[in-house]
Image (spheres, coloured by chain):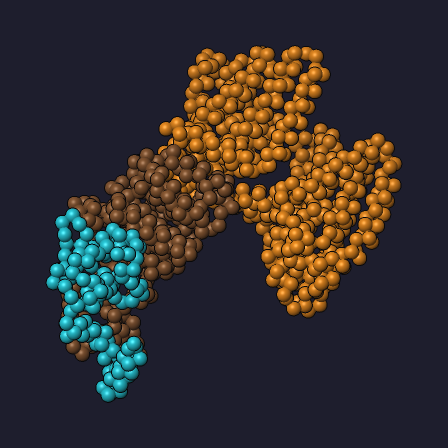
Chain colours: A cyan, B brown, C orange
Amino acid sequence: MDPTHFVHINTGSPEPIYRQLIEQVKRRVAAGQLKAGDEIPSVRELAQALAVHPMTISKAYSQLEADGVLERRRGLSMVVAAQHRRAQPTADRVELLRPTLEKAAAEARQLELSSAQVLQLFKTLLDEQAP
Amino acid sequence: MTSPHFPHTDTPSAQLAGVSLSYAEGASVLNGLDWQLLPGQVVGLLGRNGAGKTTLLETLLGLREPQSGSVKVFGQDATRRDDATRARIGYVPQQNDLFQGFTAAQLLAYFRSFYPRWNEARVEGLLSRWEIPRDRPIRKLSGGQQQRLSIIRALAHEPDLLVLDEPVASLDPVGRRDFLRELVDQVLDRGTTVVFSTHILSDLERVAFNLAFLSRGRIALQAPLDELLEQVRAFTGSVTEMASLMARLGAQPLKRTPLEAGRERVLARLPANAALPAGVAADRVNLDDLFAELT
Amino acid sequence: MTASFNQILLAAWRQSNTDSSRWFRTVFYSVLAVGLAVVLWFIPVMQLRIALVCAVLVFALFGLWVMLLANLLEQNHPVNARLVPGHLRRLRQAALVGWLLISGTQGTLVWLALAGKVPLAPLLLAAAAAGAGVGWSQRHWLWAIVLYMGPSLIVPLHLHERLAPLWHALVELWQLQPWAWLALSLAMLGVLLMRVFGSGDDTHRAQHQARERLLKAARDSAVGNRAGIASLGGAGEWFAWPVEALAARWLFRLLARAQPTPASVMARAELALHGLQHWLRHALTLGLMLLGVGLGGALAIGLLSDHANQALVAATPGFAFTFALIGCMPAFALRNMLWHTRREQALLVLLPGMPQGAALNRAVAFVQLRHFLLAWGVTTLLLGGLVALTDMPSLLSLSIAALPLGVLNLTQSPATMRAPTQWTASRPVLAFLLACAVLWGLCAFMNALIWPLMAASVLLSAALLASRWPRLSLAPSALPAGRLA
């Protein structure tokens, strides 16, 4: 696995880098891009590749391990945990979209838009992107 | 936060206490400043232009003597250091002081003769990777190349404390990324304490684990970057609302900006794991906002 | 351990190599060696030969010591002193070892030259003290003045008579145990010498910065970009204060009366083009110099009343030469200043009202020639006055030589000029010196030649001007200088 393209760091966002890492790994596991048993880059490799403090990587990995997404193997690199054998069911994946939609909902409230208008826009965007 | 490499060490790498310094013309730069650097920390020093970052770093290194207060690095007073301690400190100044008449190879050989530890393999690797000609006089190198050479010289003797003053100002984005990777190497391999000042916040976000904000001659705040991003919020409302909100949340106000009609905007740090009650409008902040507000 | 020692000496050697061209130095030293051999051939007495060789070697060693110390001081950067382990210590060690070796050799050479008539110990002490004095004058240039002028005050102030008893007492004390006293004195001088190297504190940093500025000014002036006395630091700024104040007044006057006419525009442009060689500063410097010399002369007459006349006459050629050189400096300096102000020129040519093309060429040449010719006129008048006072017509050869050279230099197209190096900047001055020497010799040979020579010079200059002026109009636009090199 090429560490440089494992995750994408967005500087300048209010979200700390370790949190961005956690969210991205979770999304990829949920979508099935990372399957059970897949090796992920070591702390050292990823820190080097992204030019990020190793403690940041380490923190993200520890949190992912606590959440059951990753597993630590003795003496070897970390892997995706066993229970993520296949992509998560849709219901769980939809839940992952919650934070982004919450933000959109908050903005819609600020703009004082009705639900119908917002849903219309969302549907248009989804239809555009569908291949 | 201590590094995993030195989990048992609590003695600070550097400690400044009550440091006050004024320029010859009388302008006060550092004002009873307290600061501590623990081993293995990577600290980004943020401050406006002219706030005194360079002066602070020079005071840390013993290049400037404060009018009052104490400066200790590795337990020794900054102005009375022995050679062993000097060998553990590396410095990349804002304007390089390389001997212009030397070639890169000659310069590195010159400094190598003074340091007990010298990582020749790393020096060679960096010279090749950054394509710095070894045998051309330094005055004929571009500004970016000279800065890179200055960085190589500081990294070569494997310091335990690395002080960098706007080290990447004259490097292009690729050069900056390379430099950060080298820095990460230093941290990984040796648990070096790093303190650097820079205006390029995206670099800081990646590599610095702690931030220190220099404002009005003091370190206004020093905290891990992640915590700041997660815990600091901007609240807007009337003065009384804010007061009660702060009390309710147990938040630590960092900056108040008065707005019109008795309202104000408060930048506050919530306690860890605090939950925001529903209906309270709180904006998250990014590093640019923190820089603008706290320095 | 020795590695760092070697590196320091190697660095000193390298830095001395870069400052002047190797070719020039090898030629210089070979000429010197050959000249010495020739002179030695003609001296019959062996002792005199030894004395001459020793004297030359002593001077050479002196030069070596000055260079070594200057290079060591340049390595004595405050950051290195504070942060590089053992750096300061090694520099001090290198200086001490160099000092002991060089002054020891010098003392021994002088002893040989004097055929052992003077005991060795005091000679060693004298050499060591001179070396240490040089060391201190490198750190503060004011010390150089003190050490240089101090001894020359001994006779006029009759110090040698007043301090004689003290001197005899010291000599007696010395002769009890000369070598012990030598050791003690060397120890004290050594400590003083070590103090020349700073340890990175605030005073060291300030001194290092002042020194860097001085070196930079020296390097700049070697290529024609003279910085003036003000760059020498605090004392220099104090001396230069009246010049600066008056120059500022002139600037404000020009700005207050600014008109879009070419004359007004060029008057203002002149300030930028000629920088510190501007005619007002030049005139004020000359004036101050005359004032200084006048005061010095009066002081000399006061102190040396009986020998005054002789001394003044003896000093006249030197003074006249210096005055002529400074007075005619525009001939050489203005062209170089055009190179050094080329970045300002890039802005100047964009200003409204600035002449363009051929008009600009003529305007620039006019401004420079006007400055030079007026300065030349004043210089010649003054030299004439000196000739009338001291009856040495050959003094005028200085201005005879300067006129055509100046006209030639200032009517070259600036657009095609190249960056001045130490060599090219000094070429016109060397030509001037050569011409002076030749003309001086001719005039000294036959006094009456002075008038025809003067007339010839004026005619030659007029002819040069007439032939080169039209060519100037056809040359590419004068500013920014050096863009077509």
- Residue C136, image x, y percentages: 49, 33
Task: Depth check: give the residue in front, C282 or B257.
Answer: B257
Position of C323 relative to C416 (above/below): above
Position of C337 relative to C35 (above/below): below
Q: Looking at the image, can residue C156 be seen?
A: no
Q: Is residue C177 left or right of residue C57?
A: left
Q: Quadrant of residue C431?
A: top right
- Which residue is drawn at the image coordinates 48% and 40% (left, top)? B135
Position of C178 relative to A7 (above/below): above
Q: Quadrant of residue B221?
A: bottom left
Q: Is residue C134 left or right of residue B213?
A: right
- Residue C257, image x, y percentages: 66, 67
- Residue B63, image x, y percentages: 37, 44
Q: Is residue A120 left or right of residue C417?
A: left
Position of A115 relative to C141 (above/below): below
Task: Depth check: give the residue in front, B200 or C317.
Answer: B200
- Which residue is drawn at the image coordinates 60% and 36% (left, top)? C21
- Which residue is drawn at the image coordinates 83% and 44% (left, top)? C457
- Residue B237, image x, y percentages: 24, 77
Report the number of numbered marks: 0
Q: Looking at the image, can residue C313 be seen?
A: yes
Quick one: quadrant of the C terminus of chain B?
bottom left
- Which residue is drawn at the image coordinates 68% and 55% (left, top)? C415
